[in-house]
Image (spheres, rainbow, N blue to C red):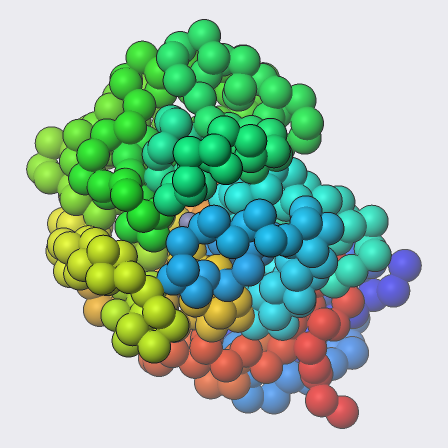
Amino acid sequence: MTLQVLLPDRVFDSITGQMLDDHVVVIEGDRIVEVAPAGSSGEPPTSRLEGYTLLPGLIDAHTHLAIPLDDGQGFAAVVQRSGAEDALLGVKHARETLVAGFTTVRDIGPWRAFTDLALRNAIEQGWVAGPRMACAGAFVTCPGGGGDITGLAVDVDEVLPRELRFGVTSGVDQMRTTVRQILRYGADFIKVLATGAVLTSGTKPGAPEFTEDELRAAVETASEAGSYVAAHAHGTEGIKRAVRAGVRSIEHGSMLDDEAIDLMVSNGTYLMADLYDGDYILENGPKLGYSEEVLEKTRQTTDVQRAGFAKAIEAGVRIAFGSDAGVFPHGIQARQFSYYVEYGLTPAQAIQSATRWAAELMGWSDRVGSLTPGTFADLVGVEGDPLENVSLLEDIGLVMRGGDWMRGPVG
Ligand SMILES: [Zn+2]
């Protein structure tokens, strides 16, 4: 197998959060062999990456690759497209995500069930280029809830194909069946919508949409199958129900109070906070045609989410980088690093949230998120030192996935 010995100016150790000078990264085939002081590995460098910092490939723990970019027109337009179109559009989004340095994503649901799995499988087969994907398969939501298709006339509403309503669920028994089915068709984890959503018209982000018993049934059923639940939750009550029920992560977590934060700390629940997309929506939403309802819900959840994030960090809540890319164009999610630093993480911690910590959330620490021997040779390179300026990550110069360069090096 081909041996590659990369010598950059610096290597970021995502386990310790330390920057290492004068180290080589040794790669054999698609795996990391070691990170060692230059000169000690016995092999001369095969690439001198002057000026660059090498880091583990980045992880975005909240993307929607198999969905057209949100245009603020509501989600009734999903009936105008086939599942094949959604999956093929996902190919474009996957490439944009990968070349931006995100070599792994946790993809948190398509509108048309299982289009994400088609994309994931195509990437795994090597048919198309993209990040490693863990997929939700479908949105588990209550009828008319944040993950349902709302705003339809009654007669149309009643004849939607099952793929568009696969995860619409009510009651404990049906919850168990739905979770089992979604996992049986190949999803990696379960996404439940514990509250209404900002972008789904007619739903209220603050309103809980499942009972604690329903959420507990989802968690139990997923865990019996060796999986876990990620809960979309904006409102305080919905967050608390989901955390008490044992979900592994809270998505958005917009309206945290002290009790919710304490519960998350004591349960070890991860917080995925999409701190960037509120600014994107408020800036671009009016020209995209977003409704006043959605813009108002965005205003109600943006600043309060950022304040809650800062408090959660102080309290020691585990953070995983997640952006909700798909609300904004794929490939620009690294803009969020500056927000994480502005609201309380150090630059090293912000990078850890998108490497080590996100991998831990996904249960994928044995394969991604660090440069530990035996993990995939997924690497990104930036010119300069991102610990001095975390926004350098918005301009990734080098991307390697499984030992193959997807971007650079030049010369
Ligand atoms: Zn989302």
Please tell me in which quadrant of the rendered image residue 217 appears. Answer: top left
Where in the figure is residue 175, as x and y percent of width and height?
45, 16
The residue shown at (61%, 25%) is 183
Quarter of the rendering occupied by the C terminus = bottom right
The answer to which of 89 and 338 lies nearer the viewer is 89
Q: Residue furthest top?
A: 173
The answer to which of 361 and 324 lies nearer the viewer is 324
The answer to which of 33 and 114 lies nearer the viewer is 114
Q: Residue furthest bottom?
A: 411
The answer to whether residue 250 is above or below residue 394 is: above
The residue shown at (68%, 47%) is 83
Number of marks: 0
Where in the figure is residue 406, as x and y percent of width and height?
72, 72
Position of residue 258 in the picture relative to residue 385 (left or right): left
Q: Residue furthest right?
A: 1
Quarter of the rendering occupied by the N terminus = bottom right
Where in the figure is residue 78, as x and y percent of width and height?
55, 50
The answer to whether residue 210 is above or below residue 13 is: above
